[in-house]
Amino acid sequence: MIRVGVVDTTFARVDMGAEAIDEIRSLTTRIKVIRRTVPGIKDLPVACKILIEKEGCEACIALGMPGPDPKDKISAQVASYGIVMAQLMTNTPILEVFVHEDEAGSEAELVELCRNRAREHARNLVMMLLSPEEMVKRAGTGQREGFPDVGPAKQRYR
C-alpha cells in the first residue's frame, strides 16, 4: 500500500482536500491517504515534510488558496519556495495546488476551479505513482489543471 499525504488549509474557502481524497479513492485502492489540515499556506511545507518523514508518505499534495491582496501573493511565493525546499530535503514529490482567490470571476466559478484543480492534480499524483508511463505520454500536450487544456503548440521541430 502506497502512503500519500494530503495537506490543506483552513484559510481556503473550498475543501480542496476532500476533493483530492475523493478523487484518489475513486481511482485506486492501492493508496492510503493521510490527511492533515493547517491554518495557512505557509504551514503546508512542514506539514508535508512531517508526513513524508514520520508517516512514510511517498508523495504529498499541498492544497491552498492565497487571497487576492499583495501580501497574499507574497505568502504564496514563500509557501511555494518552502514546498520546493521540502521536496529537495526529502527527495519526495509534493504537488503544489494553489488556487488564487482572484483567478475566478464569481464564487461559483471559484468553487468549480478549486474542485477541478484539486481533482486533476490528485489524478496526476496517482498517475505519477502507479503508471508513470501514462504521465510520459502526456508530455507537451498543454494540460491545464482546473481550466480547459490548451493542447500542444503547433510548431515544427528541427
Image (cartoon, helix red, strand yellow):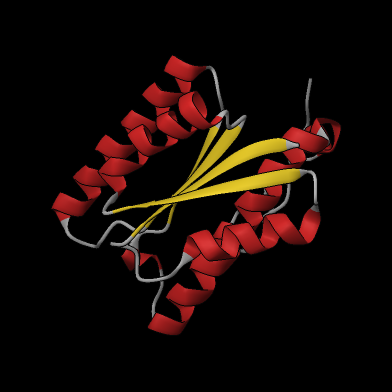
**83 is higher (above) or lower (below) than 27:** above
Vertical side of 90 occupied by 1: above or below: below
The quarter of the rendered structure image containing the C terminus is top right
Can I make out residue 155 in this image?
no
Tell whether 12 sits left or right of 156.
left
**Is residue 68 rendered to the left or right of residue 27?**
left
Q: Count of labels shown?
A: 0
Across and down, in percent, residue 14 comes to: 42, 70
Q: Nearer the viewer, residue 51 or 107?
A: 51
Picture layout, residue 35 above or below residue 103: above
Asked whether 43 or 50 is in front, the reply is 50
Q: Name the foreground residue: 62 vs 154.
A: 62
Quarter containing the N terminus: top right
Image quarter for residue 150? bottom right
- Residue 22 % position (x, y): 65, 64
Rendered location of residue 124, percent (x, y): 68, 45
